[in-house]
Image (cartoon, rainbow, N blue to C red):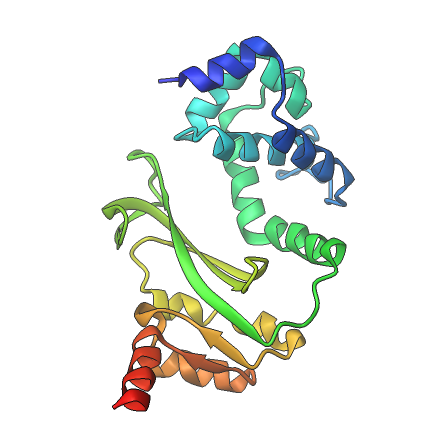
Amino acid sequence: MISNIVIKHALSSEIDPLLQALFQYIDQLSLPETPYVTGQPLISKKSLLKCFFLKTYFSINSLPQLVDILDRFGYFRRICGFNEVPHLSTFSRAGKWFREQGFSVFNSQLLKDLGVRCPNVVIIDSTALRSSFYDSQARWGIFTRYKWFKGYKLHLCTTREGIILSHAFATANQHDASVALELFPSLKKWKIEFALGDAAYDSENVRNMAEETGIFFIGYFRINCCYIEHNV
């Protein structure tokens, strides 16, 4: 079901200033404009990225619903840069590309534009991404907010200000500690001293991987234990 706020924006044809600024920034990005499948017509990755941000901005539940909204409202097609709506399979392939390659390209350019300096402390955490029940690749997992849910988890390593330095995407059934191992290798260039995470990330393998990267990992319970020992 399409929410009233989506219809209101479509009918008013007034783009939200925040969304407008984001789309203008996307236009400045350098993304490799190559087809996802050899022989297929070229579809702009920037336009597809705008669609994904539109999906998040309006809390659109699924790719089929996103395609339906783009089909029904020409205003959204225009601000994303489409005359005709791509097939659902194109959005699926684009989503896979952004998860595996595109996000790193986008993030690297963003860090450069922001002039991010080497942080000495980073924070590791995850967020749940609920999927359609018909998503064959999604898995069931548990998350504090949703309890049991079907979907994925996005694991992020950020500065204290919330700037993303590293990420890992996984199905919801994968344990946080096993996914955390993917976060550390790309952090070597930052010369980070400490990484803070909750108890779900606290394992011997994670601490060893962090140490190999030159980082001291502190889990949630470890922080509390240190606090208690210090005050007893």
Depth order, front residue of 227/21: 227
Residue 151 is left or right of residue 21, and the answer is: left
Image height of 41 relative to 156, above or below = above
The residue depicted at 72 percent of the width and 53 percent of the height is 109
x then y, percent, for residue 224: 30, 78
Give the residue at the far front of this rendering: 231
Residue 46 is left or right of residue 59, and the answer is: right
Q: How many marks?
A: 0
x then y, percent, for residue 187: 59, 72
Image height of 135 relative to 128, above or below = above
Image height of 35 relative to 80, above or below = below
x then y, percent, for residue 28: 78, 40
x then y, percent, for residue 27: 75, 35
Depth order, front residue of 81/85: 81
Q: Looking at the rendering, in which quadrant would you find the N terminus?
A: top left
Depth order, front residue of 184/196: 196
Give the residue at the far left of this rendering: 148
Q: Is residue 39 visible?
A: no
Q: Is residue 83 visible?
A: yes
The residue depicted at 25 percent of the width and 91 percent of the height is 232
The residue depicted at 29 percent of the width and 56 percent of the height is 173
